[in-house]
């Protein structure tokens, strides 16, 4: 580890905690619109969750949980990068960089770290262990943008180059990459900028989704085409936020920075995106660790990064993962086989699960399955 890498510990001032509780208690609640979830997050559900945030959520316990992981910060390309770095007790462990989703944080991936770094302690095969690096995306959490802001566009490629330099600084000459959502955009880009050191890319989904080009459907059967309709629609239905973030993110940033409930509502709404919008979040919330969700909401709130996290849309980085055939690709929640056939035209797909994503935040609602899939994919590449 180089001298440019400095240890980091989360320590939110008590005054910030008091301010959060005060603001939550003074929330101005809107009237409920007709239509329930179809109009957005219902007032009753959000009010109950916000009250737990105010009176039942223990930030200090979550802060201690995060601080139990070794954390560091370093500057790369003018950007301060926060990351967790955990070495496995297994001598043959493969280094693995995990990139979180949007809108989320490193807290999304906490449930993966133990099973991946120490499979022996979690009933897994010790030969499939990983040294894990979990960075906060630039503009997210404890990787804040500098002031004044860097005017150069933020793209998935730029982040991938930063990740490649980070792994080099940590001494990881041969490594794998996993990503979900925004992380699934960055991880394939790593293959394009650092294929010499990357053994494989594992993502949760996004490959093979038709873009509207008729040539993409060439050779597919009628059954294939029919099977594409519902999964493809999940990426367009209920996503009215995307055009706004791509054009006017600063305007939304005022609400997220001034109202913790506005920030929370946005995170809760995104739960539903891949699970049958508009009612998906209603079904998911009872099964979700709400303190984990509130940990991410708190991280956005305490660091004031709700607005800066929108660079994925404003700088045109949002979309589908790029095709690359330089290193093998594995997909854990890929959807129909027809998606795989389309994706295989531009990628070396060696592992594919037909599961559909359970949520925008896969690691938070399907951690066990995701860990098993990562182990299986990289186990064949060592």
Image: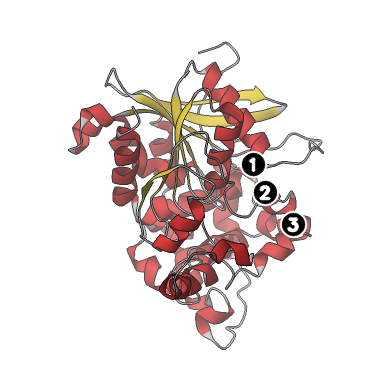
- The numbered mark, 2 or 3, whose residue comes first in the sequence reads 3
Q: Nearer the viewer, mark 3 or mark 1?
A: 1
CB under 8 Å between discs 1 and 2? yes
Q: Which residue is mark 2?
A: 317
Up the image or down, 117 lies above or below 292; here it is above
Q: Nearer the viewer, mark 2 or mark 3?
A: 2
Answer whether residue 70 is visible to the viewer in this image. Answer: no
Of 83 and 97, the residue lying toward us: 97
Up the image or down, 363 lies above or below 214; here it is above
Of 341 and 95, the residue lying toward us: 341
Q: Position of residue 98 (x, y in %)?
A: 46, 37
Of 3 and 334, the residue lying toward us: 334
As drawn, the residue found furthest toward the left would be: 123
Up the image or down, 19 lies above or below 188; here it is below
Looking at the image, which residue is at 72% across and 41% down?
A: 154
Q: CA distance from mark 3 to mark 1?
A: 18 Å
Dot 3, crowdedness within 10 Å: few (<14), some or many (≥20)? Answer: many
Q: Position of residue 270 (x, y in %)?
A: 53, 63
As drawn, the residue found furthest toward the top would be: 3
Q: Which residue is mark 3?
A: 249
Answer whether residue 102 is visible to the viewer in this image. Answer: yes
Q: How is the image coloured?
A: secondary structure
Quarter of the image holding residue 237?
A: bottom right
Q: Is residue 353 left or right of residue 38?
A: left
Looking at the image, which residue is at 52% across and 51% down?
A: 181
Q: In the rendered structure, find residue 156 and report the number of the disc placed on it.
A: 1
- The numbered mark, 3 or 1, whose residue comes first in the sequence reads 1
- The numbered mark, 1 or 2, whose residue comes first in the sequence reads 1
Q: Position of residue 188 (x, y in %)?
A: 54, 40
Tell me the SS state at disc 1.
Answer: helix
């Amino acid at each position: 580890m180089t001298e440019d890498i400095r240890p980091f510990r989360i320590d939110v001032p008590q005054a910030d905690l008091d301010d959060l509780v005060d603001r939550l208690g003074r929330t101005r609640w809107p009237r409920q619109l007709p239509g329930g979830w179809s109009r957005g997050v219902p007032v009753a559900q959000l009010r109950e969750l916000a009250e737990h945030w105010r009176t039942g959520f223990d930030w200090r316990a979550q802060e201690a949980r995060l601080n139990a992981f070794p954390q560091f910060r370093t500057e790369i390309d003018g950007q301060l990068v926060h990351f967790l770095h955990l070495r496995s007790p297994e001598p043959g462990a493969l280094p693995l960089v995990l990139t979180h989703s949007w809108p989320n944080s490193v807290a999304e991936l906490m449930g993966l770290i133990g099973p991946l770094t120490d499979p022996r302690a979690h009933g897994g095969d010790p030969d499939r262990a990983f040294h894990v690096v979990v960075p906060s995306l630039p503009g997210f959490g404890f990787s804040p943008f500098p002031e004044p802001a860097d005017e150069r566009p933020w793209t998935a490629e730029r982040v991938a180059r930063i990740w490649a330099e980070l792994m080099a600084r940590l001494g990881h000459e041969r490594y794998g990459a996993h990503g979900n959502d925004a992380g699934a955009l960055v991880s394939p880009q790593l293959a394009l900028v650092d294929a010499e050191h990357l053994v494989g890319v594992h993502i949760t989904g996004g490959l093979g989704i038709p873009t509207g080009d008729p040539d993409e459907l060439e050779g597919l059967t009628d059954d294939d085409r029919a099977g594409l309709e519902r999964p493809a629609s999940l990426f367009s239905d209920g996503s009215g936020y995307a055009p706004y973030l791509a054009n006017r993110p600063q305007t939304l940033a005022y609400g997220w920075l001034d109202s913790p409930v506005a920030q929370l509502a946005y995170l809760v709404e995104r739960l539903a995106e891949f699970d049958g919008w508009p009612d998906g979040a209603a079904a998911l919330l009872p099964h979700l660790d709400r303190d984990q969700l509130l940990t991410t909401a708190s991280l956005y709130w305490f660091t004031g990064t709700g607005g800066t996290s929108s660079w994925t849309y404003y700088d045109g980085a949002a979309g589908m993962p790029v095709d690359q055939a330089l290193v093998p690709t594995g997909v854990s929640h890929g959807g129909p086989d027809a998606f795989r056939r389309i994706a295989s035209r531009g990628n070396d797909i060696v592992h594919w699960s037909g599961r559909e994503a359970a949520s925008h935040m896969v690691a938070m609602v399907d951690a066990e399955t995701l860990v098993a899939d990562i182990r299986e994919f990289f186990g064949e590449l060592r």
